[in-house]
Amino acid sequence: MCKRICSLTLITALLWSLLGGCTRPTPEPVVSKQGGKLVIGLYQEPATLNIALATQTVVSEVNEFMFEPLLGIGPDGMYFPKLAKEVPSVQNGGISADGLTVTYHLKDNIRWADGQPCTCDDWRFTWEVQKNPESGVRSTIGWGDIEEVQCPDPQTIVFKFARYYAAHLQTIGGSWPFPRHATGDPAKMQEWKFNREPLGNGPFKFVEWVSGDHITLARNEYYWLWSTEGKPYLDEIILRIIPSREVGKQLIKTGELDVLWNLTEADFPDMNIEGVTLSAVPDTRTERLVLNLRNPEVDAPCADALRQDGMWHWALGDVRVRQAIRYGIDKRQINDKLLYGKATLGTAELNAGWAKADIPVSEYNPDKARQLLDEAGWKVGSDGIRVCDGCQYAENGRKLRLKIQTTSGDKLREQVELVLVEMMKEIGVELYIENVPSAELFATFATGGFRAHGRFDIVMYTSSYGPDPQGQMENYYASWNIPCAENKGRGYNFHRWINDEVDGLIKLAGSNPDLEVRRDAYRRISEAIDREIPAIYLYDRMLMNAHRNALQGWVDNSWQSMGWNSAEWWLQK
């Protein structure tokens, strides 16, 4: 007999017996979202954690856990308030009728991870960093159009634009701010301690970075949702640096990783793992070949100097050579052979969204490629590799031998390179491979990065853009964004492509509020890229990550990094 019955009153005992004697009803299990450590595998290591200096995608992935902007972008591509109380518009008074004044009101209790208030002055400081010519920022897109940041009170930020900038919600509203009190002189940004030990305002705070091994983040208990909603739920996030995706696939299978970042379509067959979900959603990312149109032996001249004689790349400066290389690439074979037919063949920089370009897949035609190379003065040599015989920019007798580079340790990219080597051999072009670690390929201008200084032939990597493509098109294709000493290495026009018509269209698209005018401008830019071929788009990539099913709250969002809603993540115990 149940011992507890003996101490109950008669009435209580009768009720107890009616409910099943000595057996209590089983209560519903209480789900606790609080606590736990999450381990994420990254096969790239950041060169810096200062987003304004970085060019690696992985830096955004790490920072997304530590920083929050005024506005977020949801999975539907729509802006929503993050630290701001609302998305500014003309209707709510946040945007002036002429579009030159944009006002944000901060939510209450926004703090940095050291407990200091995060206020308007931090956004004003961020603008000061962006406009300082000595700071070394990689891009000033949007920020350069601001003439003043006013702070009528700590919770109100007023951006005063010198001229209308169409993509301000994404470029300014979506930017992470710098803490004035925890950084330093903008002119000495490259020396900031912050670059390796950042102080953020997001759900997690920086703890340590052990090079080659891991970055540790912990719950930020000053996060604005911690005291009211208990978010973030997780105690700790470990960002583990791993050698490759292949190693990562084994580690998530054994449970040593909870999340594996940035998979590809080539990984589909390996990801049928019990207890693991592979998320794959359409994205704007495109794997491409960036062709260097200018002399790789001249170190980083600006656009005006590049217009002079003698500045063309000895082979790739001739559009016929670029056309021949593209005709010699069978994109369908790459997709079928290496990506299991899961990718979409690449056509243009803008492959999704309202400004998507209607550009057909480039033709695979080795005969046309050979004909073009013959016309360009590149004749077949005794070993099958072409040599200059009256070509435009090289000395006679020089072989058509080009270096291709990408991130080392990336199996898919290495396989694509090998396929490209064989395809180019068919048309008499010799490609040789010289891969480097991610941090070296994407190294900044200030650190002597060969890509930023224009010391390469062909590099292969992925780039993507947000709902508004202005920043992408201006950064990558405007002549004023060719990195050089004069502009302190700003911009991403590593192709060193100069097209005056495109420059004008980029300015038009960025300064006009009419969506149709902007759409037409982007269409014409895409057509010019297709004609002149500063880049060859191989395939469009899906956004693919894997996570163990114990992780709850994961929401795919192709417009932001994977940790965009990490305050909602929790582990099912």
Image (cartoon, helix red, strand yellow):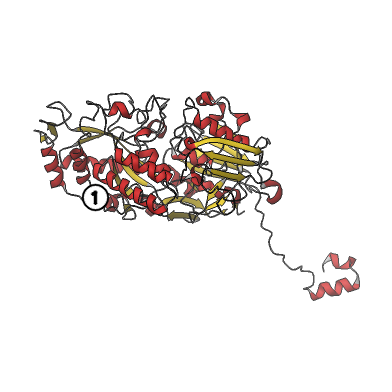
The answer to whether 184 appears left or right of 111 in the picture is left
The answer to whether 291 appears left or right of 217 in the picture is left
Name the kind of residue labelled 1 in the image.
Answer: Ser
Instruction: Indicate the secondary structure of the residue bearing disc 1.
Output: loop
Q: Quadrant of residue 477?
A: top left
Find the residue positioned furthest to the left. 382
**Which residue corresponds to mark 1?**
362
In the displayed structure, 161 sits above or below 23; it is: above
Other residues around mark 1 within 10 Å, as few (<14) / some (14–19) / many (≥20): some
In the displayed structure, 572 sits above or below 307; it is: below
Find the residue positioned furthest to the front. 98
Query: Residue 319: horizontal and vertical position, in percent?
Result: 20, 38
Residue at 59 percent across and 53 percent down: it is 92
Residue 457 shows up from this direction? yes
In the displayed structure, 446 sits above or below 4; it is: above
The answer to whether 468 appears left or right of 327 in the picture is right
**Quadrant (top left, top right, bottom left, bottom right) of the N terminus:** bottom right
Residue at 15 percent across and 46 percent down: it is 366
Query: Residue 22: horizontal and vertical position, in percent?
Result: 79, 69
Residue 43 shows up from this direction? no
In depth, the one of 82 and 505 nearer the eye is: 505
In the displayed structure, 53 sits above or below 326; it is: above
Query: Residue 218: horizontal and vertical position, in percent?
Result: 62, 40
